[in-house]
Amino acid sequence: MKLYSWPRARASVRRRKAGGSRGPSPAPKGLCYDQRGRESTSRAHPRLVPGAPPPVSRRTALLGALVLALAVFAVDQGLKRLVEGSMRLGESIPLIDGVLHLTFIKNPGGAFGILGGQAGILLLGSAVAVAFVLWMLLAGEPTRATTAGCGLILGGAAGNLVDRILEGEVTDYVDLRVWPIFNAADVAIVLGVGLLLLAALRPEGDAKPSKEAAP
């Protein structure tokens, strides 16, 4: 067995440090590069393509959705209390005559008056909607559109759910004269569903690659 003296061992270590690593430095973890050395795509997000909506972290998405939901809930409850405190039940005030009226009613059904008198089904539906929204935020890679859509649905569902739990019916006041009377929570739910549909139907692979990515 060959033994090395202490000075020789120290000199060997110094030579290794001075020589440095041989060959090209490894690419950062999670990134891959094309033949010209340009960053092309991320292994951490393999579905990313040029022009696709950028994903956000789950924590950021959840926080943003909760903030938006709280804002929708506050606006909805504030408008309901204002209508209840300043109008009589059944009273209608024309804002744009024949087009838009402010009409105070109590709705025992769901959005736009559907499923009237089915309190159990409505409560179950609200619970399922909340669970679905949370699943979308915690699973996969939510985008800004899905985050906004989930926040709108969560805030609207919470606003109407509180009314059903406390009073057994929901306060509605927006009257378009050609549509069932609704409220701000219903508007938020419809807008949220629309955003989720647009995000789901938007093709992620149709965007043309950039010139830099071309070989």
Image (cartoon, rainbow, N blue to C red):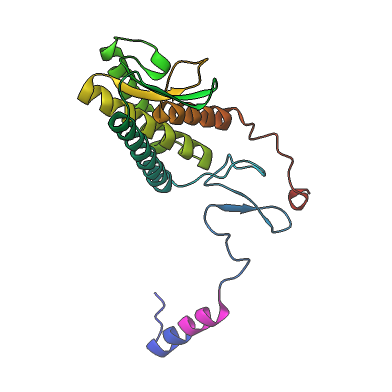
Check residue 13 for magenta coloring. Answer: yes
Which region of the structure is painted magenta? 12-20
Give how far across and how far down residue 82 sits, in percent: 32, 35
* Residue for point 63% across, 35% down: 204
Which residue of the protein is positioned furthest toward the bottom in this rendering? Answer: 7
Between 182 and 87, the residue placed more toward the observer is 87
* Residue for point 26% across, 22% down: 164
Viewed as shown, does residue 10 lie left or right of 15?
left
Between 87 and 156, the residue placed more toward the observer is 87
Viewed as shown, does residue 70 lie left or right of 101?
left
Check residue 48 for magenta coloring. Answer: no
* Residue for point 38% across, 27% down: 132
Which residue of the protein is positioned furthest toward the left in this rendering? Answer: 166
Residue 21 visible, this orientation:
yes
Residue 141 visible, this orientation:
no
Residue 23 figure quarter: bottom right
Between 182 and 176, the residue placed more toward the observer is 176
Between 64 and 26, the residue placed more toward the observer is 64
* Residue for point 39% across, 12% down: 114
Say which quadrant the N terminus sits in.
bottom left
Task: State whether the magenta stretch is mostly helix, strand or loop.
Answer: helix
Give how far across and how far down residue 150 sits, in percent: 43, 34
Viewed as shown, does residue 174 lie left or right of 168?
right
